[in-house]
């Protein structure tokens, strides 16, 4: 667990203003559709921070931050991968490529995006809907 949650200044200094705007817009989009717990943590070896969206002990997705970079990760289990694969033509080529190149582990396929703008946000919401139906109207 983190001792202190990074504030706006620290996040802006870390990822830069344009990416912090992307981060905030993505958070707002997820919060608009999902009522979840938010957990800050250290980002492991590769990232400075991890910001998880969880409900009922299950992670919906996680955002990551490091110098000049933000990450959005979603982990798909077997059933979720089948749903995506049967609907993949409805996602952008970029999302399909990142999905195809993502590493599959024993607990699922870890799909990491590094958005630099909001262009993939509709696809992100589609991926989240595969993971869990939105619980906010």
Image (cartoon, helix red, strand yellow):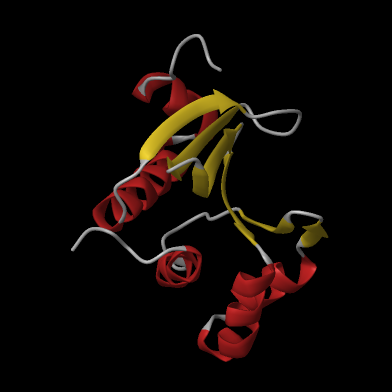
Q: Where's residue 119, x and y in %?
A: 44, 68
Q: Nearer the viewer, residue 127 or 96?
A: 127
Quadrant in which the C terminus is drawn: bottom left
Image coordinates for residue 80, horizontal then vertical, percent: 60, 71
Task: Give the residue displayed 46% in from the left and 64% down from the top.
Answer: 128
Q: Is residue 6 above or below residue 106?
A: above
Q: Quadrant of the N terminus?
A: top right
Choose top left, top right, bottom left or bottom right for residue 101: bottom right
Q: Residue 91: percent from the left, percent from the top?
A: 53, 81
Residue depicted at x 61% and y 32%: 66
- Does 6 appear above or below 76? above
Residue 8 image-quadrant placement = top left
Q: Position of residue 24 (x, y in %)?
A: 35, 43
Vertical comparison of 48 with 94: above or below: above
Look at 61% across and 89% down and name the residue there: 86
Q: Residue at x 55, y 80 (%)?
A: 92
The quadrant holding residue 111 is: bottom right
Side of 104 relative to 121 (left or right): right
């Amino acid at each position: 667990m983190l001792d202190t949650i990074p504030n706006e200044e620290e996040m802006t200094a870390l990822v830069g203003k344009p990416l912090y705007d992307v981060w905030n817009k993505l958070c707002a989009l997820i919060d608009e559709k999902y009522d979840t717990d938010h957990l800050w943590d250290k980002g492991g070896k590769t990232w400075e921070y991890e910001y998880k969206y969880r409900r009922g002990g299950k992670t919906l997705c996680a955002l990551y931050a490091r110098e000049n970079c933000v990450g959005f990760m979603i982990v798909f289990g077997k059933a979720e991968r089948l749903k995506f694969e049967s609907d993949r033509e409805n996602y952008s080529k970029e999302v399909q490529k990142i999905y195809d190149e993502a590493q599959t582990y024993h607990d699922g396929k870890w799909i990491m995006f590094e958005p630099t703008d909001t262009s993939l946000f509709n696809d992100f919401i589609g991926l989240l809907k595969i993971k869990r139906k939105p619980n906010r109207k």
